[in-house]
Amino acid sequence: MDVEKLKAFVSRSWDAEVMPALLAYMAIPCESPAFDPGWETSGHIQRAVDLMAGWARSRLARVPEARVEVVRLPGRTPVLFIDVPGDARAPVLIYGHLDKQPALDGWAPGRSAWAPVIEGERLYGRGGADDGYALFGAILALLALREQGLAHPPCRILIEACEESGSGDLPHYIDQLEERIGNPGLVVALDAGCGDYERLWSTTSLRGQVAGTLTVEVLAEGVHSGDASGLVASPFRIARTLLSRLEDPGTGEVRLADLQVEIPAERREQARGAGLLLGSMLYRPLPFLDGVRPVADDAAELALNRAWRPQLAITGMDGLPSIADAAAVMHPWLALKVSLRLPPTLDAQAAAEKVKALLEAQPPYGARVEFRAELVSPGWHAPPLAQWLRTSLEAASIGAFGRSCAFMGGGGGIPFLSMLGSLYPATQFVVTGVLGPQSNAHGPNEFLHLPTARRLVSALAHLLHDSQ
């Protein structure tokens, strides 16, 4: 492999062929079905699928044996399935998704979710980094190899349209496509993050999640707070008490022992390595207000907090008016959206049952308390890394980035990986991506770091060439 020639091909093709299509895709408000229940009527997901399928067909026209197909099951979001034949090695499955989170407020002047804009090395807009680039990058990596006449294994590219809604449609397509996917020797998922933009990062684990609604009811209707306070327990106070069963309010540590796991020694060592590489850069890119500190000073401990220790967040609340509309009223009920991130190896369904039992047991003052789990998502823990893949990751990172690769657990989740991990226990996994410092997936000012995207495509080509 001529590494410099490969990088030059990727850079040239990215600018000329990928960027126009990527910009067009980012302008499509193809929100995931959880945020656009009328997705079939709005047609935005279909527009994104058509754009990507058309681009893939035009670029793979130079590979006559390649096949690009939009697969549809009744009532489910479509998937894009691409089969690029290769030599006699085990196939490689490359994964990404095209559905997006909603726009949200807070974008800086001149930026918005659906009007992508380039500022220096950053491409701002929703979905470019999370992770519309994946389809374009995967095909470009294969073409880069073919441009030099280099071999690669059969590659199957699967792009779903329901990931941001928990990938509820994906198991049905995995069943439908199981024979065509085959028994992959390597799965590459391009939906993860990177600790910095200086090297290739491999994600070694992803957390599970239990999310649901905690409802506390004390009255049939709101009453004057002067009459009720001191007689009726505030639903807010009851909710706060219940949450304190789950989380220590002083430290943030999750108190329920059933939600803790033993962190593997190798993952602790990798967290130490990531902490040494990143230091305060692990948290400094976050938009802390002046004077606000992270929950710990040790970067390795912060990495383990984010990847392996259960963490609670309250992401929404109903039952209270806005401050402008607040009156002297004791409100009858309160509902909180509870999001609990779980260790990668924990049984998420069992965790949901434990959390429900803990929150609903012996409700204070006889209040009506219910916890309804609405999302139960398993985590994922990478199998041991084969020596050939460890060697290839290092060479790919040095070739594309000029630095050694690094490993770190991820804080989010990709349901697809737990599905594949159970189906193919002997398969190797590379989980990587372009979501680095300040890239702000799901939030305002989300961006794709363009140099990292190009380098990652070059690294992917190297991995595909080496795949065993």
Image (spheres, helix red, strand yellow):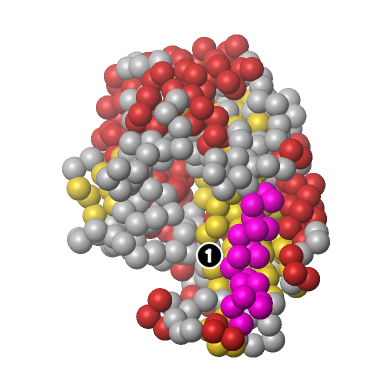
Can you say which quadrant of the picture contains the C terminus?
Answer: top right
Q: Between residue 369 and residue 424, name the one nearer to us.
A: 369
Q: Give the class, few, some or many, for how many residues have Cα within 10 Å of label 1's Cα (few <14, many ≥20).
A: few
User: Which quarter of the figure has residue 169?
Assistant: bottom right
Which residue is painted at 38% across and 25% down in the image? Answer: 278
Q: Can residue 292 be seen in this view?
A: yes
**Residue 441 point in image, percent of width and height:** 42, 49
In the image, residue 341 sits, relative to residue 282, either above or below, namely below
User: Which quarter of the figure has residue 363?
Assistant: bottom right
Which residue is painted at 47% across and 18% down in the image? Answer: 273
Q: Can residue 437 be seen in this view?
A: no
Can you say which quadrant of the picture contains the N terminus?
Answer: top left
Residue most extreme to the front: 230
Q: What element carries label 1?
A: strand
- Residue 187 belongs to the span the image colors magenta: no
Left or right of 422, for residue 288: left
Which residue is painted at 45% across and 43% down in the image? Answer: 134
* Count of picture labels: 1
Q: Between residue 294 and residue 18, name the one nearer to us.
A: 294
Q: Main secondary structure of the magenta part?
A: helix
> Which span of residues is magenta-colored?
228-246
Q: Between residue 347 and residue 199, name the one nearer to us.
A: 347
User: Residue tagged by mark 1?
Assistant: 316
Q: Which amino acid does label 1 sit on?
A: Gly
**Residue 168 point in image, percent of width and height:** 67, 57
In the image, residue 177 sits, relative to residue 29, either above or below, namely above
Which residue is painted at 70% across and 35% down in the image? Answer: 260
**Residue 34 point in image, percent of width and height:** 57, 66
**Residue 420 point in image, percent of width and height:** 69, 39
